[in-house]
């Protein structure tokens, strides 16, 4: 019998279904908020550690040949992590596992988790071995613009990093189990250990091997492997307690495992197509000259900060909640609309100003994080321009992630797959045009060619978002996109951006240190945005200011 979450019947509002919907209890706000806060806190700490890592790498490697090689070496095996890791597992495994737990079928849930973990370990190990043996052709395919020293160093680093990425895949399996039990913090804070290992390796190697960039990069690669093992092992005890056993299983005939595998394939293809887009960008960037690939990676670190803190935090907390709903199609549709209404507002309130900040005061943000040692003012400008291109699709990408989670909760991963394929097609064609033929014809710099790559991805993200919104409306009815709030946040962020930029320029003109000027720009931007939104009576802004007042030591309450 077809499970209710596989039904494709279009929702038709009737009096009977309305009565059913009213009978459905509302999800408890404290749990929803607590889950998002736990994810956000864990991601915040890991991202702060990541920013420290990037600053250390910038200090010792700058935008050198070794930096390009190291970035490419991390990116190439990341295909394995991104295809088999968190995104795919969250979309295919969590809905099945969380539903079994919600129905009280703990033994079945444990069996599914162990079988999925065993299959994942086997596949990840085999692909890691293939990656080590096939490092040279992989580099020649995915970084064809590298030659000589850069190519040989990249090959060596790929061979080191690949086994560590297989461990990160198993870490993502742990995350899937923990998230299904609403244990969010540990799984999202564990990457701090990975970052700490890289930072430690970079500092030790940088001091002992100053001037030998290739050797420093090799040390950092080994640090990545050690950090991957630490990230996996720190989560394992909690997973063992939840599953009550870690006995390997190959029960591929289990209905829960079958449901996971059926969802896994289209999600894998969807994630794979997005990864293909990233590798196309890497191939094109390798033709744009020294430093561009490293600059794109640096910009991506900043771009992913709001994606992770706001988009991923909300989506990760919402997926098990949306997946746990039981009942008929109409009840599930109303449940999803209820969850999306609040979560989309939170994402828009936080992500739109982040995108504007990357454009308006992006130079200050990049300088504060990266400008040190061998990373100079010219490098800051390059990363800022690339970051501004990425910002164009930031809001669409984060909202699209949440809409995709709604489809996964419904057990229907095919619409996100189709939308992702459309996104990849637009990204590839437009990115190629901006990076190569248009640049040759118009003569603009490699930096602006890289801007074209990231801006193309942003434009494609909007197309993907609009498609997901349209298709989801066919399943659950109107999708509660907060259009008025989005326009309001855009206007308030534009005002804040102008004030923040002016504050940074005034501080620089007054002779303030680089980091003081950057903090002035960021501080004025944040205060101005929050002040305008609070004055307009936006609930999210008022809730945030009330929370700050409660935490103030001067607050008599």
Image (cartoon, rainbow, N blue to C red):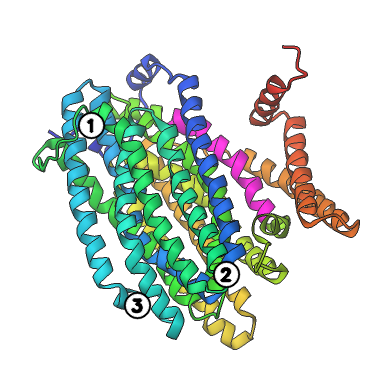
Residue, disc 2: 210
For mark 3, give the secondary structure: helix
Does residue 91 show up?
no
Residue at (56, 73) in percent of width and height: 292
Q: CA distance from mark 2 to mark 1?
A: 62 Å
Q: Is residue 345 magenta?
A: yes
- Of tags 1 and 3, which is closer to the observer? 3
In the image, farthest residue toward the front: 208
- Seen from the viewer's position, the closer of residues 185 and 447 is 185
Residue, disc 3: 141
40 sits left or right of 93 in the view = right
Q: Earlier in the sequence, mark 2 or mark 1?
A: 1
Q: CA distance from mark 3 to mark 2?
A: 31 Å
In the image, farthest residue toward the right: 510
Q: Earlier in the sequence, mark 3 or mark 2?
A: 3
The quarter of the displayed image where residue 475 is located: top left
Which quadrant, please, contains the N terminus? top left
For mark 2, give the secondary structure: loop
- Seen from the viewer's position, the closer of residues 406 and 316 is 316
Q: Residues within 10 Å of mark 2 (few under 14, many from 20)?
A: few
Q: Is residue 527 above or below residue 74?
A: above
80 sits left or right of 60 in the view = left
The span picked out in magenta is 337-358
The quarter of the displayed image where residue 193 is located: top left
Residue, disc 1: 4
Residue at (28, 23) in percent of width and height: 102
């Amino acid at each position: 019998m077809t499970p209710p979450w596989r039904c494709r019947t279009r929702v038709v509002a009737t009096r009977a279904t309305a009565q059913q919907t009213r009978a459905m209890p509302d999800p408890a706000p404290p749990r929803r908020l607590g889950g998002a806060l736990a994810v956000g806190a864990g991601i915040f700490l890991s991202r702060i550690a990541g920013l420290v890592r990037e600053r250390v790498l910038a200090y010792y490697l700058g935008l050198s040949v070794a930096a390009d090689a190291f970035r490419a070496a991390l990116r190439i095996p990341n295909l394995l992590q991104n295809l088999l890791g968190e995104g795919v597992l969250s979309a295919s495994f969590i809905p099945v596992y969380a539903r079994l737990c919600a129905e009280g079928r703990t033994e079945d849930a444990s069996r599914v988790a162990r079988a999925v973990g065993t299959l994942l370990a086997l596949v990840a190990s085999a692909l890691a071995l293939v990656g080590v043996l096939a490092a040279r052709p992989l580099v020649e395919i995915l970084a064809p613009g590298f030659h000589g020293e850069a190519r040989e160093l990249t090959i060596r680093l790929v061979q080191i990093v690949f086994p560590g990425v297989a461990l990160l895949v198993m870490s993502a399996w742990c995350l899937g189990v923990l998230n299904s039990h609403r244990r969010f913090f540990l799984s999202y804070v564990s990457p701090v250990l990975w970052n700490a290992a890289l930072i430690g390796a970079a500092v030790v190697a940088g001091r002992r091997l100053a001037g030998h960039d290739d050797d420093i990069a090799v040390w950092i690669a080994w640090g990545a492997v050690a950090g991957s093992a630490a990230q996996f092992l720190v989560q394992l005890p909690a997973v063992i307690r939840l599953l009550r056993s870690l006995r390997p299983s190959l029960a591929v005939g289990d209905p829960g495992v079958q449901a996971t595998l059926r969802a896994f394939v289209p999600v894998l293809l969807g994630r794979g197509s997005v990864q293909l887009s990233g590798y196309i960008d890497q191939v094109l960037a390798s033709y744009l000259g020294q430093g561009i690939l490293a600059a794109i990676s640096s910009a991506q670190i900043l771009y992913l900060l709001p994606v992770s803190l706001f988009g991923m935090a909300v989506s990760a907390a919402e997926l098990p909640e949306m997946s746990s709903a039981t009942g008929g199609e109409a009840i599930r549709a109303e449940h999803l609309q209820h969850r999306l209404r609040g979560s989309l507002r939170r994402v828009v309130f936080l992500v739109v100003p982040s995108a504007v900040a990357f454009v308006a005061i992006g130079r200050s943000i990049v300088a504060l994080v990266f400008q040190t040692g061998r990373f100079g003012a010219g490098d800051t400008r390059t990363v800022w321009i690339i970051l501004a291109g990425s910002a164009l699709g930031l809001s669409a990408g984060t909202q699209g992630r949440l809409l995709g989670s709604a489809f996964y909760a419904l057990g229907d991963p095919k619409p996100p797959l189709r939308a992702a394929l459309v996104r990849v097609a637009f990204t590839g064609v437009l990115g190629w045009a901006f990076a190569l033929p248009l640049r040759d014809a118009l003569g603009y710099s490699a930096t602006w060619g890289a801007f074209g790559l990231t801006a193309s991805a942003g434009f494609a993200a909007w197309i993907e978002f609009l498609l997901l919104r349209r298709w989801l409306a066919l399943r659950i009815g109107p999708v509660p996109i907060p259009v008025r709030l989005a326009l309001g946040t855009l206007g308030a962020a534009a005002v804040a951006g102008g004030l923040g930029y002016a504050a940074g320029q005034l501080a620089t003109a007054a002779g303030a240190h680089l980091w003081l000027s950057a903090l002035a720009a960021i501080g004025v931007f944040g205060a101005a945005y929050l002040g305008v939104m609070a004055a307009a009576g936006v609930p999210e802004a008022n809730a945030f200011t009330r929370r700050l007042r409660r935490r103030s030591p001067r607050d008599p309450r």
